[in-house]
Image (tube, helix red, strand yellow):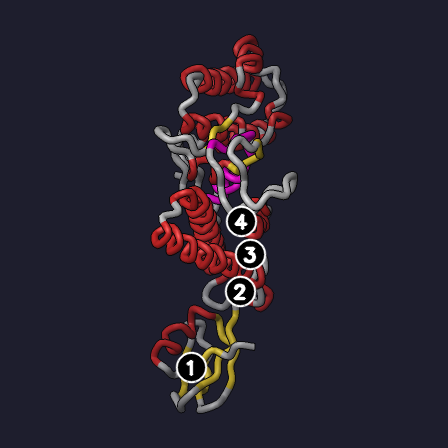
Amino acid sequence: MFCEKAIEIIRELHRMGDGQLPAFNEDGIRQVLEEMKALYEQNQSDVNEAKSEGKSELIPTIKFRHCCLLRNQRCIAAYLYDRLLRIRTLRWEYGSVLPTNIRFHMCAEEVRCLKDHGEFEIDDGTIILLKKNSQHFLPRWKCEQLIRQGVLEHIMS
Amino acid sequence: METHSYLPVPPGVGMEENFLSLDDILLSHERLPSRTECTFPRLGFLEKSSDSRDIQEGTKMEMPLFLAKGLYERKRRVVSVELPKVYKEGWRTVFNADPTVVDLHKMGPYYYGLGSQLLHFDSPENPEIAQAVLQTFIGRFRRTMDSSQNAYNEDTSALGIWFHLELKATGQKRND
């Protein structure tokens, strides 16, 4: 059945009722996204076939896949939101410098610096020197803006 | 109580679910005995028991609640859901006689939540189901209040946990 991986990552989080932050399940998220891509593509194809060849009997199947797509989307959104709540609680508890063992559980991104951007201060006080071609290991949410600006480039390993 | 403690998104109230609630997501993963009322072409691979390319009309399968809800249509035959035993007349009579005697956890973790969600499927027994779930809660609540007020010792921590679980299951608990 579809959506089994999605419920697995939810269960993982739900198991920790006290607000602990488990390691970011990067692989789990990736698998859910892959399933979504497959469901979407199969539906695109079936929709085209239903329209061009009048095969309305495909409609229940299309709806079925669509339900599962929405379900996967819901699970990912809830997963990320719940982690956000946990991280926020930890921030209140520990202040802006989170212990390394917690940071380790957050989703990190390897980025390469594309141009000399000079010193960049992250809000926990760490200063990173962004020189062209230097590589850094930064949490996703800190890099996103710089990636959009074209200063950093995500390294896909 | 600490301020800023981890407060997850609570489950929805009654027949509603909260989109981001982990509890509601787990609840809506529960499987219900169902029957397909039309053919689902090309999805036969999901059905281990048959070799067909399609899921044939009239196939009995255990369908997760989210899927049954998503596919169900009042005016069209797409899927039909059978009431799990604990919501059928036999069990309703038991709950009616004495709501406190049943071990609810043995019946599955979501007696109240699932009972509320079943109302989406327009069963003719809906009024009876809703009534049974409500009266069961009231009966158990009353009994727990009674025993808590008559407890010899002051240790009501287990009681607190019971309240927390039962109220969560009804979606009545809010994190205020």
Distance, label 4 to label 1, CA atoms, is 34 Å
At a point 53% along the width and 31% down the height, the residue shown is: B58
Furthest-top residue in this view? B97
Query: Is B35 one of the magenta-colored residues?
Result: yes
Tag 2 or tag 1, which sits nearer the N-term?
A: 2
Q: Which of B143 and A140 is in front in this view?
A: A140
In the rendered structure, which amino acid carries the disc numbered 1?
A: Leu
Tag 3 or tag 4, which sits nearer the N-term?
A: 4
Residue A106 visible (yes or no): yes
Do tag 2 and tag 3 residues touch (Cβ < 8 Å)?
yes
**Which labelled disc corresponds to residue A3?**
4
Distance, label 4 to label 2, CA atoms, is 24 Å
Residue B160 visible (yes or no): no
Find the magenta span and give its range: B21-37
Q: Name the residue under label 3.
A: A21
Mark 2: few, some, or many residues within 10 Å (few <14, many ≥20)?
Answer: some
Q: In this view, does B132 lie above or below B13?
A: above
In the rendered structure, which amino acid carries the disc numbered 3?
A: Leu
In the rendered structure, which amino acid carries the disc numbered 2?
A: Met
Distance, label 4 to label 3, CA atoms, is 23 Å
Element under label 2? loop
